[in-house]
Image (cartoon, grey):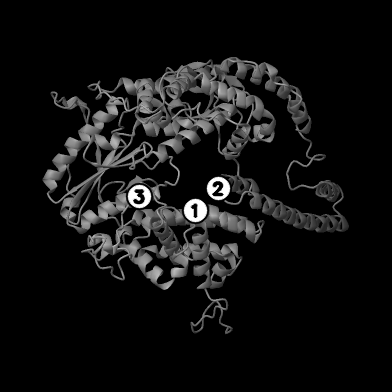
Amino acid sequence: MLAFGTALRALSWQDVINSDNANVAYENFETSLMELFNIYFPSNLTKLNRKKCPVEDWMSKGLLVSRNNKIRLFLLSRSNPSEFNLNTYRNYRNIFNSLIRKAKKLHYEKLFHKAKFNLKETWTLFNKAINKKPKKNEQNITEIKINDLLASDPEEIAEAFNKFYLSIATEIVGTINPPPPPQPVPDPLPLNPNELFDLQRNPVTTEEIAQTMKLLQKKRTLDINGLSVNFISNFILTLSRPLKHIFNLSFSTSTFPNKLKTAKVIPIFKSGDRTLTTNYRPISILNVFSKLIEKIVHTRLSNFLEKHNLLNKRQFGFRSEHSTTHPLSLVIDNLSKANDTKKHTIAIFCDLSKAFDCVNHTLLLNKLKAVKVGGGAVEWFASYLFERNQLVNIGDSKSKLGKIKLGVPQGSILGPLLFLIYINDLPDSSLLDTYLFADDTTLISSHSDFDYLVNFVQIEFQKVCQFFRQHGLALNHKKTNFMILSFSPTIRNTKINLFIDNNNINEQRSQDLLLPIDQISSSSKQPYVKFLGVLLDPELTFKNHINHVSNQLSKGIYFLKTSKNFFTEFCLKNIYYTLIHSHLTYALTIWSCVSPGLLDSVVKKQKTAIRIVCNAKPNAHTQPLFKRLGILPFQKLTEYFNLTFMHSYQYKFLPSSFDNYWPTNRSVRNAQQNDLVLRNDNELYLPPCRLKSTEFFPFYRLPRLWRNFDNEFPNITFIRNKNEFKSKLKEHFLNQIPEDYRCERLFCHSCSPLP
């Protein structure tokens, strides 16, 4: 590494700097870099001798010598099984095994320290520690069906995968009934060019390149050249000089280098028959330097869009300061308010087939103009989108290059943001309440007259279907479904028919273009919808989701039990956060809005996990253990997340969809500037509810919780900084757990001195 870095710094890069063509400049850069890389990192592999070289990271040279001694004593005890030789081997083996366990504990404690809060790395370390074999991956593809015949030639298999992945989007778009042309987009560009998004206005600097590289995930996945982000990040200060010239040249000439347009695709098995290409998910790996320039453009474009509020406020996916909790909260509140006001609701959960792969490039460029992207930048995006290629890599075999005709680049950084722009005006296509998380689309409407509601929803849903068809997107009628939510059990279980209507509006209807979608009810085989990771049932009881969380906690407890003997408490705590805490806290504000009795199983399993982490007795009191680990019990954890959510609302950290969501008392009574000021004017208005069960839902519960906490602990709610507030709030809840916990139960099994 050091020698390569020294040789890299010695390069002058003059052939790159002197070039005024982005393609030529990058080709010269890549040629010089790869020539040097192949010299210092040849591809030949050597197999290590376990007897001489430590294969495991925790195996020191001393332990390696002891291991060889143990093997020697074992062989001696077998060839001459005297009592002395057997005892000598057993004693030596026991001491060696004890040292191995201690070495592994120390080694993994250091690694878990480094991987703190990194979920993926924690999982990798955990699986490695328990010697869990990885799942079969793409290297196990030995045969595939091609035209109903099994093929085993690796290159033929790779070619079959590439043709399948390249054709699937075209086939989906080909099945769409041709819609009427969309309304022409009026020219939105203002006269002042300074109001447009322009890539040339601020030249790229070496500092920006170095800072951007820090933002990329340090993955070790190898691109088509055998380079990884993790490897290149070590030399970014040296490479930033030629890259600065290439990137600025790319922006000034509106040219995305052709060499950066090739993706390496690796098929990953999902489930089912291993001989079918349909059962493999394509993982696209882009050039490292493509990711770098994309990240620079993504940062600039997303900042521009957010600053000018150009993205629809009902879109929550792939946006800074947005999360799944936000649309979940809005949808659940919408449903609970309708239920409380004696309205019936129909919610449609849409599923698009290969949405990102079906994006029409020409239409996307028009959408970019609609969000004030300037001409030069639009030309750069056109160069970025067109003439892209991919090849499939399976083991040592590669397919031929294939041309990509549709879609935003898979595995790219810009792809998700471009898709948000592509469907940005979807909520305006109908009168249904629309909630978006990238391509996940939820449509909701409520009314007191059920018959009117059904007719209204079908008419408006057809408009949404037409929008999708105009954008080359196809709804999957097998996965798109709907749900009726009502205060009336009779209405809730009423069977109705809703269709994906692919007929053009105001044209003669064809029954062949009506695709029925499934209704989810309490009597369905699967009586819930998985909405952004939360299992939503028609009664809004969240029983299915609570059972799901409970099952995930049981799996986490099993892993904790299997690993408690060779992990320190610190490591077990990290595993707890990975396997237990992550399931407890995901959308906790949403699914905890039920009566406390339904949450008992979750509470008990959290306590079980805490006892394992602390190596305590199965019936030990958990209050001191929570205090010792600095972890909040479930009830306090729920309050913590609810108050954190309200703090973000109070200080306007939430998305614009929550603006004036919970008004103050003064706003509700429409007080004018000169009206009398009341002492509770600035407090949040507590919305009244008709049903007792409705009180548990976020819209009604959270403002009441915040007001009570604010009145009692204003020194905490006064803190504006989000991280400081979270730290102070957690400290507050932990301080409520007594230092010297004393059990008051008579003849307690855990702490009673009586036999």
Quarter the N terminus occupies: top right
Residue 119 tag number: 2
* Local SS, label 3: helix
**Three-letter amino acid code of the residue under disc 1:** Ser
Residue 288 lies, in percent from the top left, at 59, 29
Residue 643 lies, in percent from the top left, at 42, 62
Earlier sequence position, callout 2 versus callout 3: 2
Q: CA distance from mark 2 to mark 3?
A: 23 Å
Instruction: Residue at 57%, 76% (x, y): give it.
Output: 739
- Location of residue 550 by image quarter: bottom left
Q: CB atoms at circles 1 and 2 under 8 Å apart?
A: yes
Q: Dot 1, crowdedness within 10 Å: few (<14), some or many (≥20)? A: few
| In this view, 253 is above or below 679 | above
**Three-letter amino acid code of the residue under disc 2:** Leu
Q: Which one is in front, 696 or 87?
A: 696
* Local SS, label 2: helix
Residue 500 makes an appearance in the image: no
- Location of residue 696 by image quarter: bottom left
Q: Which one is in front, 110 or 603?
A: 110
Please indicate whether residue 545 sits to the left or right of residue 633 in the image: left
* Residue wearing tag 1: 582
* Local SS, label 1: helix
Instruction: Residue at 49%, 27% (x, y): give it.
Output: 199
Residue 138 tag number: none
Q: Which one is in front, 182 or 41?
A: 182
* Residue wearing tag 3: 328
Quarter the C terminus occupies: bottom right
**Number of numbered labels in the structure image:** 3
| In this view, 71 is above or below 184 | below
Pick out the residue farthest to the front.
674
Earlier sequence position, callout 3 versus callout 1: 3
